[in-house]
Image (cartoon, rainbow, N blue to C red):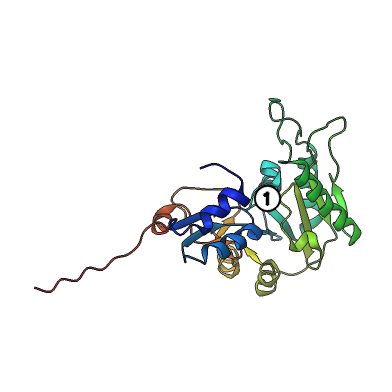
Amino acid sequence: MTGYGETGGAALAAHPQVDKIVFTGSTEVDKLIVKAAAGSLKRVTLELGGKAPTIVFPDADLDRAIPGVTLGSFFAQGQVCVATTRIYAHKSIFDKLIEGVRDAASKIRVGPGLDTSTQMGPLVSATQLKRVTGYVQSGRDEGAHVQAGGEGVTGSDGYFLRPTILTNANPAMKVVREEIFGPVVVAQAFDDSELDKLAAEANDTEYGLAASLWTQNASVAHKMAKRIKAGTIWLNCHHVFDPVLPFGGYKQSGWGRENDAEAIENYLETKAVTMAL
């Protein structure tokens, strides 16, 4: 059945003969679905928003981290729920990392999807472009520095925004706290590698869908992965998926998991049959 969310989707979520709802989208819409589903106590599986942190330690291989962070930030115009949206980099390599990501981002060819030379297309609508550029302006207003992007493509009438990097960010800013869903990443430096402190800052969000860590120290990688509250942790990579790996989020990033055997469980009911002879 096709239709708009506020009509067809709302009817499905509320209908007593619908036993199960699976939804991928925003946390805001999810809360409406949960309320509608409460009337018949139907089961729901939800894959929602994210605000993925990527933490780059001082020993990281920058030849891998720079293209990895760039891909994580700007793949599919940043309209990906697991997109790298918060960079935490050690102060000793912060400038080099940001310079590298800025240089890589400046080479991304932004344009129409039907142009074979295009590497990054438009945002999904004029409304979304206005929303994303509003976040960029909010960052400026709150003291963030635009290191790259922040504007559209000259001579284009599409919904284009160049890959955007904001520095001088702090945890109170809207661009740090809220999901932007566009090609915008905020970067902050840290001055020590105390894992509990780093994890607390990375976890200081209502979301918990994904994160990535960049380090050549396997012990640090696994200790940090244990501390991060997210359903997917990538070590020295980002945007790597496999059907055998369960995918889903903590906190307001969703309920349940996709992929692997755990996904099948979302659609099953357990029944016990006891016979007396």
Q: Which residue is pictured at 67% across the width and 43% down the height? A: 75
Disc 1 secondary structure class = helix
Q: Residues within 10 Å of mark 1 (few under 14, many from 20)?
A: many
Residue 186 drawn at (x, y percent): 78, 56
Q: Nearer the viewer, residue 227 or 229?
A: 229
Q: Amino acid at mark 1?
A: Ala
Q: Residue furthest left?
A: 277
Compared across the picture, whether 147 is left or right of 221 comes to right
Taking depth in this image into account, of 189 and 201 the one nearest to the observer is: 201
Name the residue at 89% across, 62% down. 142
Residue 189 drawn at (x, y percent): 79, 62
Classify 207 as above or below 117. below
Q: Give the tally of numbered discs.
A: 1
The answer to which image quadrant residue 126 occupies is: top right
Q: Nearer the viewer, residue 107 or 173?
A: 173
In the rendered image, which quarter contains the C terminus?
Answer: bottom left
Reading the image, the residue beneath label 1 is 65
